[in-house]
Amino acid sequence: MLRNPIPLQSAIKLTMEHTPLMAAEEVSLSDSYRRILAEPIIAKHNIPPFNRAPYDGFAIRSQDSAQASEQHRVVFRVVDHIGAGSLSNKPLEQGEAVRIMTGAAMPDHADAVVMLEQAKLIESENSFTIRKSFRPQENVSLKGEDASVGKVLLEAGEQIDPGTIALLATLGYSKVKVAKRPVVGIIATGSELLNIDEPLVAGKIRNSNGPMLEAQLDRMNIPFLSYGKMNDQLEDCYHRMKQALTETDCLITTGGVSVGDFDYLPAIYEKLGAKVLFNKIAMRPGSVTTLAVLEGKLLFGLSGNPSACYTAFELFTRPALLGMMGASKPYLCHTKAELSEDFTKANPFMRFIRSRISYAEGRAFVAPTGFNKSNAVTSLAKANALIVLPGGSRGFTKGDVVDVLLLGTEDGGREWKI
């Protein structure tokens, strides 16, 4: 089959252009963590909803402190004592104060808070003195200073994290509208595959791609159906894929997409009536990554080589699944770092190197994690990043600044141009 490699950016663009959008659903706040917002979050009320004390101390009228100084301490008499959730029913008069706790509403006429450590207590007289004047609103958390009613605080497409949960709870969102999560099917193909609990025999290897893809989907909080492994039999693979497509929103197969005599995925796509968008990308590893569409569903044909499969998932499948949920930042986060060792191997295609990024003295350093052929698994185990090396005839040396994509971060990134 004729395969013409397309540029990486073209493959990403085609993927996202053909990504369908899932419907929305309401879930309870307790079930919303890591989901994608399907509606903007608007402040239903001011935050905070009233003027309140941000510290333990004494609420006073600022005008009564005007004459306070090191040489002239001003006396205040405590007329009430309130904690958070309580209200004082004693409007302050001249020289009076209310003992107030963090979060409590300011009493009527009070417009400043003397922190406890700023006051010299005279317990026998239920009073205290201060040696500085206070400005109006000093040490006061003002109504609406965090957010005013009607303000858009979060846009649709943002992922819900613990901080988002705090905001939603503050605003009384017991239920929140989120995008439905796509159900993803996983099929590992290859007559050479064994189950992980089977002993090795000559010519066989254990199925590592299936469990790896399950973990990558788990990391994204995406539900999946695993259809196990399949031998290289055209009709069996065809019927398994046809059944899986009736039960899932997206299908990932691993293996069978190259040009060997037993690589049946191209023939299966044709038999299913799927349209192949691309079947070769100018990149390493994962050049044989294939994407087809059928009745609005994405069919990812990933390499049977573990590192190639892993990398293609992160570059194409991950953003597509997030795009299906309307995520505003579906791509891997992009940064730059210094190579901490030489990487002399040149390649005509763009190369993604399993690597580990670390930080020291305010600088980022990155190095390959080991054996970097597409069939490698040991380098995957230590990787938290992908070094991105442009294609060309030269290698790279220690100290070169390179592009890096971060793996495993909950929050995604904007589209990157490398």
Image (cartoon, helix red, strand yellow):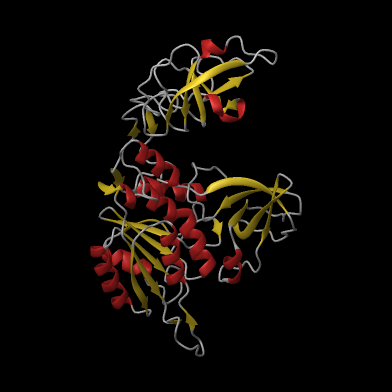
In percent of width and height, residue 40 lies at: 33, 35
Q: Is residue 96 left or right of residue 228?
A: right
Q: Quadrant of the N terminus?
A: bottom left
In percent of width and height, residue 226 lies at: 34, 70
Give above or below for 177 relative to 205.
above
Q: Give the residue displayed 34% in from the left and 42% down from the top.
A: 37
Q: Name, please, the residue furthest toward the front.
A: 124
Q: Give the residue displayed 44% in from the left and 32% down from the top.
A: 103
Q: Give the residue displayed 26% in from the left and 73% down from the top.
A: 239
In percent of width and height, residue 213 lies at: 43, 66
Q: Quadrant of the C terminus?
A: top right
Foreground residue among 233 and 216:
216
In percent of width and height, residue 162 lies at: 44, 47
Give above or below for 6 relative to 135.
below
Foreground residue among 162 and 290:
162
Give above or below for 316 relative to 192.
above
Foreground residue among 31 and 244:
31
Give above or below for 104 relative to 60.
below
Q: Is residue 21 visible?
A: no
Q: Give the residue displayed 49% in from the left and 42% down from the top.
A: 415
Q: Is residue 416 left or right of residue 213?
A: right
Q: How many marks?
A: 0
Q: Is residue 414 left or right of residue 230?
A: right
Q: Is residue 71 visible?
A: yes
Tell me which corner region of the image, top left, top right, bottom left or bottom right, holds residue 123. Answer: top right
